[in-house]
Image (cartoon, rainbow, N blue to C red):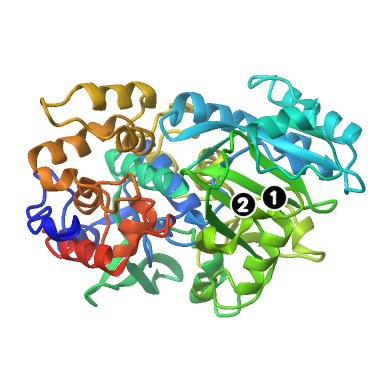
Amino acid sequence: MSTLQSVPALGTHPTAGSNPGRAETREQLAKATYDLLVIGGGILGTSVAWHAAQSGLRVAMVDAGDFAGATSSASSKLVHGGLRYLQTGAVKLVAENHHERRVLAKDVAPHLVNPLTFYLPVYKGGPVGAAKLGAGVFAYSALSAFGDGMGKVISPARAVADNPGLKTDNLKAVAVYYDHQMNDSRVAVMTVRAAVESGAVVLNHAEVTGLRTTRGRVSGAELKDRLDGTEFGIDARVVLNATGPWVDHLRRMEDKHALPSIRLSKGAHIVMKRKSPWKAAMATPIDKYRITFALPWEDQLLLGTTDEVYEGDPADVRATEKDIQQILDEAAFSVKDADLDRSLMTYAFAGLRVLPGGPGGVEKAKRETVVSEGAGGMLSVAGGKWTTYRHIGRVVMDKLAKLPGSPLTDDMEPVKSLVRRVPLPGVANPNAVAHRLLVDREPGARMDPLTARHLASHYGSLAFDVARLANEDPALAERIHPEGPEIWAQVAYARDFEWAETADDVLRRRTTVTIRGLDSAEVRGRVEEMLSRKA
């Protein structure tokens, strides 16, 4: 009998104190007038909802799909200063990125953001020479006040000792610098949780079908629950359009004559099983503007990314065979062929960068956030990245307060008075959490070390709540799949505390089962059965 078949009563009863059901949330959203309605639950929407709720505003946030269900969970998983931005002279941007990166890693999310060493290989005939790269990584380190160490150049032999998969033919030297990485989906869920703990009301899988107006001003939205078809509305004094690639679609709901304000660039990635140890990430220059990454992530190898104009339906974006081949071809500049065998690939995904409209290629476009006000008073915000997502939230809040005749100014705390380094839920030292998970067990009920480490680095101190579910129901302590660290208690926890409604919500965004290539039909069926038991 398989592991999956041996746990028929998996997570039968929702946990006491769990999140309210969808019907209750819809009723709560429909019966009140909110100070701010945030449409879109990605990087920008979650940050604004969190900061707005902290400032004392009554906040609602909705998303047509899952929170971070589109591009915000399809990033390169990096929290970084942006070494390549130095190429375009964006020194101030790099310094700002470094500041936010270090705050996230030290104060806000040390349980979710992890340090990562980067190697930049320099090959004979490559687009960038060793001297220039050496100077670049030194300047990059200087902009971070050398907080992670000093950029340097090391020998090929030393680099290969750490990364045996590094291709050494014509390798002249390797430049070294330091950044961080994270699981973007988990950071998003924790930010939603932080917003709710500050008073926000949130609902995913709720699509905006129209905007409400009062005397020519946008005053709310009409919505449809995508899961059961229920229609409802939300009244709000200010509406924020943070829908990413769909920002112009919503702007045209406000003003059918609204001109395009953005352009889209597709970035694809693939995930591979690791054949060799990878103690450092690889960032290989492809040309003057582009770098391809080979990142050790979630015990896998993450490769990418592409950067090309996208003009199709944002809902249809995906990694194509052409994208996959391009990523493998570019990775082959610095990664040995054995580590790039197609049989090692477990998953491929793509997201859309939202860039300001304008001339020139997308690879040269500025990665900046644009905030605009429409004819009906709706604010639209587009662009942004995970590294500076807290900063973007504060920028939007400042814009809200300074709008001429803003209805919110008197009701919100000034941005400058907000606590600037509020940690995300579960903040803790993941090493300490993992240790506790291993030693604080009933006799004979030892947790697998890989599972303990996985829970600690994805939930922080909230891992104890997940472990408690497993302690109370031994079936929930079983692994979801024998080849992955996740346990069934995480599915129950995602259902009851993390707004997971579909199998993809659980397997791709609340856990890493999908990216490991382990979401079999049997696994998905069991997850769907558990989700159907949601109160």
Determine contact: label 1, label 2, CB under 8 Å.
yes
Residue 206: x percent and y percent? 32, 67
Residue at the spot 25% in from the left edge and 26% down from the top edge:
438
Nearer-the-camera pick, 9 or 449:
449
Look at the image and tell me whether residue 313 can be seen.
Answer: yes
Residue at x 32% of width, y 71% of height: 223
Residue 303 appears left or right of 154: left
Residue 100 relative to residue 49: left or right: right
| Residue that mark 2 sits on | 339
- CA gap between label 1 and label 2 equals 6 Å
Judged left or right of residue 314, residue 234 is: left
Residue 73 percent location from the top left of the image: 47, 55
Q: Which percent across, then down, holds residue 141? A: 73, 25
Q: Nearer the viewer, residue 451 or 227?
A: 451
**Residue 187 locus on image (x, y percent):** 42, 43
> Looking at this view, is 463 or 324 the one in front?
324
With respect to residue 374, does 138 lie above or below? above
Q: Is residue 88 depicted above or below 309 in this figure?
A: above
Secondary structure of the residue carrying numbered label 2: helix
204 w.r.t. 296: above or below: below
| Other-residue count near label 2 (Cα within 10 Å), few / some / many at <14 / 14–19 / ≥20 | many
Circle 1 Cα neighbour tier, 10 Å, few/some/many (<14 / 14–19 / ≥20): some
Instruction: Please state, as top left, top right, bottom left or bottom right, where the C terminus lies in the image.
Output: bottom left
| Residue type indicated by callout 1 | Lys
Q: Is residue 261 visible?
A: no
**Quadrant in the picture for the N terminus:** bottom left
Q: Which residue is mark 1?
A: 336
Looking at numbered disc 2 in the image, what kind of residue is underneath it?
Answer: Asp
Quarter of the view holding residue 320: bottom right
Observer-nearest residue: 433 or 191?
433
